């Protein structure tokens, strides 16, 4: 029986990319983290009604351990589910908060159905969560969303878990797969590493573009001094340090 991997990572942290890498390289089965096509079609019929997806994950949580973008439940709560009697391995992905917030502003998903505000206003505005996020209904701002989600990943330490970063995936995807294989004792499909060079969202970009954008921190060009100040007021600096990120002056 294949070992089960559950991936948790906020929006825009490259969860799709790591899923593809695991699929191409490891003899493992990923627990679903998104709704199936038939539920997605129902959602399209009822635009703006996020309760469709919320209900799906509420009803299926015991089988899949929730939405991949959810706040992870603490280990003692997760241990109550029968699925953990099998070998379930938790992989979490964290992204630099500055670049992540820029990405979230570009694509805020269900947050705005009309015109979205400028970046600085966005950073200072409340963030309305959806039910499947397992968070408070309204957070002070999207920066708090980064704090809440990423701090929850640390609570999985007593389970079979591995925390990685978006940047590490782009820096050396082969090494990330090696780490997952070694940490979870998962066999590789082949001795040859297989990469996925195409973007899972934007066909005009590939891993070369994203590697340059994130590893050379091209995203800094999109940050004003005011934006940095606003982020620094709320971001959990201890959490940043834990994941190896520096606070921008």
Image (tube, rainbow, N blue to C red):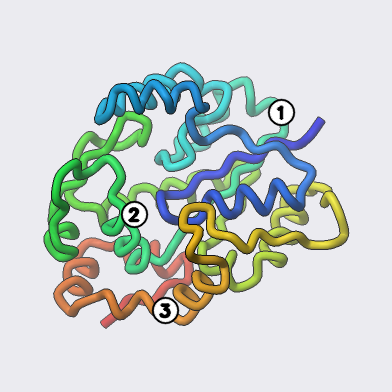
Can see residue 97?
Answer: yes
Labelled pair 3, 2 in contact (Cβ < 8 Å): no
Label 2: element kind: helix
Q: Say the numbered circle drawn on residue 146.
A: 2
Residue at 42% over, 55% down:
12
Q: Say the numbered circle drawn on residue 217.
A: 3
**Mark 1 lies on residue:** 86
Q: Nearer the viewer, residue 243 or 169?
A: 169
Q: Residues within 10 Å of mark 3 (few under 14, many from 20)?
A: few
Q: Is residue 80 above or below residue 8?
A: above
Farthest top residue?
A: 59
- Residue 186 picture location, percent across and down: 79, 47
| N-terminal label among 3 and 1 | 1
Q: Nearer the viewer, residue 47 or 105?
A: 47
Mark 3, mark 1: which one is toward the viewer? Answer: 3
Marks 3/2: CA distance? Answer: 19 Å
Quarter of the image for the N terminus: give it: top right
- Residue 126 picture location, percent across and down: 15, 48
| N-terminal label among 1 and 2 | 1
- Residue 159 picture location, percent across and down: 61, 41
Marks 3/1: CA distance? Answer: 40 Å
Q: Nearer the viewer, residue 110 or 69?
A: 110
Q: Is residue 241 above or below residue 81?
A: below
Is 86 on the left or on the right of 70, as rendered? right
Label 1: element kind: loop
Can see residue 77?
Answer: no
- Residue 38 picture location, percent across and down: 49, 22
Label 3: element kind: loop
Please identify the quarter of the rendering in which residue 88 is found. top right
């Amino acid at each position: 029986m294949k070992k089960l991997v559950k991936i948790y990572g906020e929006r825009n942290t490259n969860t799709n990319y790591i899923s593809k890498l695991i699929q191409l390289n490891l003899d493992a089965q990923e627990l679903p983290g998104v709704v199936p096509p038939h539920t997605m079609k129902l959602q399209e019929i009822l635009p703006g009604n996020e309760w469709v997806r919320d209900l799906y994950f509420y009803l299926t949580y015991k089988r899949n351990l929730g939405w991949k973008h959810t706040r992870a439940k603490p280990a003692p709560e997760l241990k109550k589910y029968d699925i953990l009697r099998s070998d379930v391995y938790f992989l979490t992905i964290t992204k630099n908060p500055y670049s992540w917030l820029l990405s979230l502003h570009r694509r805020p998903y269900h947050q705005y159905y009309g015109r979205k505000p400028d970046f600085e206003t966005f950073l200072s505005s409340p963030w309305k969560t959806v039910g499947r996020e397992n968070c408070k209904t309204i957070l002070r701002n999207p920066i708090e969303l980064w704090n809440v989600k990423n701090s929850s990943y640390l609570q999985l330490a007593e389970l079979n878990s591995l925390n990685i970063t978006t940047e590490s995936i782009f820096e050396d995807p082969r090494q990330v797969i090696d780490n997952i294989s070694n940490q979870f004792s998962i066999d590789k499909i082949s001795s040859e590493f297989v990469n996925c060079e195409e973007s899972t969202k934007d066909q005009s970009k590939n891993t070369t573009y994203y590697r340059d954008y994130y590893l050379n921190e091209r995203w800094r060009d999109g940050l004003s001094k005011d934006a940095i100040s606003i982020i620094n007021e709320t971001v959990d600096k201890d959490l940043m340090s834990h994941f190896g990120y520096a606070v921008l002056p």
